[in-house]
Image (cartoon, grey):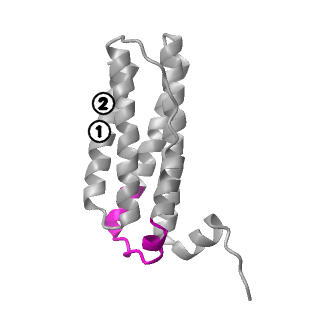
Amino acid sequence: MNSVEISLKMETDAVDFYTKCAEKVQNPVGKKMFLSIVEDEKRHVELLNKILKKLDMTVEKASPMKAIQSVFAEMKDAMVARVAATGDEMEAFTIAKEMEKEGRDFYLKAAAEAPTPLEKKLFETLAAEEEEHYRVFSNTLEFMTNTKNWFLWEEKGVIEG
């Protein structure tokens, strides 16, 4: 298997895993976050399929953080009154973080070894997006485990006393 084929398998597995996580997670923020990442991963699958089929394509950068910011903005009230996350949900986010970190590392290596400029650009873009996904999962995990402090730091809350 070459790097593109391995990447396609990784991204397909990610779509499947994150879809299952979205189905199981009870926290509405976590559910929406997983579904948003699923859409990014599906786009990665499309790009990789185009490379495999040697079709003309342009690599467009997505902004997962923008999508997640809108999720948080839309669900601010729900976040304040969130349902406590279960241990299984925390494990899902922890696994997701690790998957994204490993994906980023793989894509950085694949970019360095890419046989064509287009593949190099694709792998660099995928690495950057996986890094952003990692930050999204980290941020969500922090929110779910320490909501009050998350709002203080992320929303730049003012402490009055």
Q: Residue at x 49, y 44 (%)?
A: 64
Q: Residue at x 36, y 42 (%)?
A: 39
In the displayed structure, does residue 155 sit left or right of residue 31? Answer: right
Q: Which mark is residue 84?
A: none
Q: Main secondary structure of the magenta part?
A: helix
Q: Which mark is residue 9?
A: 2
Q: Position of residue 106 (x, y in %)?
A: 47, 31
Q: Kindly report the distance in space between the C-alpha atoms of the residues bearing marks 1 and 2.
A: 6 Å
Q: Residue at x 31, y 13 (%)?
A: 53
| Residue linked to disc 1 | 13
Labels 1 and 2 touching (C-beta < 8 A)? yes
Label 2: few (<14), some (14–19) or many (≥20) C-alpha neighbours in 10 Å: some
Q: Amino acid at mark 2?
A: Lys
Quadrant of the snapshot with the C terminus: bottom right
Magenta residues, as a range? 75-93
- SS type, badge 2: helix
Q: Amino acid at mark 1?
A: Asp
Q: Is residue 95 above or below residue 100?
A: below
Q: Kindly indicate the quadrant of the structure image that contains residue 21.
A: bottom left
